[in-house]
Amino acid sequence: MKDSELTMAQQVAQAVRAFQQQRTGLVPGAVTVVLSDETLVVTLQGALSAAEQALAKTPAGAAQVQEFHRQLFRSSVEPLRQEIKRITGVEVREAAAEVEPSTGAVVHAFTNGTMVQVFLLARNVGAETWDGSDPEKSH
């Protein structure tokens, strides 16, 4: 499928997947892209190596993994910022990364001075339940 046939979200997901592989050598298991006003949040599932997952089992190790990924993101994010600008036509003003070591999820947030809170749920919530269109839940 050509880039012109993909949605912006799919193009950003592809760019993030390639960025993650280039800088860590790992392809994340899944990449989710969510846009809310000026905030673009990208969640990468399965983005930590087996060694990082093992290290993250202790509080000190988890802190090391988090700090490593923050620094790696900070020092290498500029090409990804430019790619997001190319795809969306909008400049990225801020970018941050956070790692949840216990699950191996990495979150990239590209914001406009907005605080981003990310909650990783224990399971998927179906779209029909989320938006209220689930006929079994109708009153």
Image (cartoon, rainbow, N blue to C red):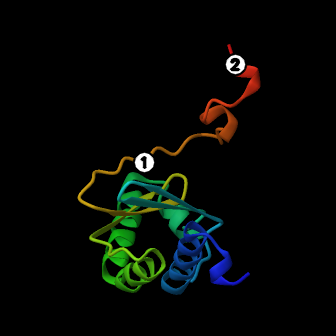
The quarter in which the N terminus is drawn is bottom right
Query: What kind of residue is marked 2?
Result: Ser
**Would you identify the image quadrant in which residue 47 lies?**
bottom right
At which x and y percent is residue 81? Answer: 38, 79
Residue 64 percent across, percent down from the top left: 36, 65
> Where does label 1 land, which residue?
118
Asked if one can make out residue 139 in the rendered structure from this viewpoint, the answer is yes
Q: Are marks 2 and 1 in contact (CB under 8 Å)?
A: no
Q: For numbered disc 1, what is the local secondary structure?
A: loop
Foreground pick, 77 / 50: 77
Q: Quadrant of residue 68?
A: bottom left
Q: Which residue is mark 2?
A: 138
- Left or right of residue 128, residue 115 in this image: left
Horizontal side of 85 relative to 114 (left or right) equals: right
Q: Secondary structure at mark 2?
A: loop
Q: What numbered label is drawn on residue 28?
A: none
Q: How many marks?
A: 2
How crowded pointer 1 is (Cα within 10 Å; few <14, some 14-19, many 20+) is rated as few
Q: Nearer the viewer, mark 2 or mark 1?
A: 2
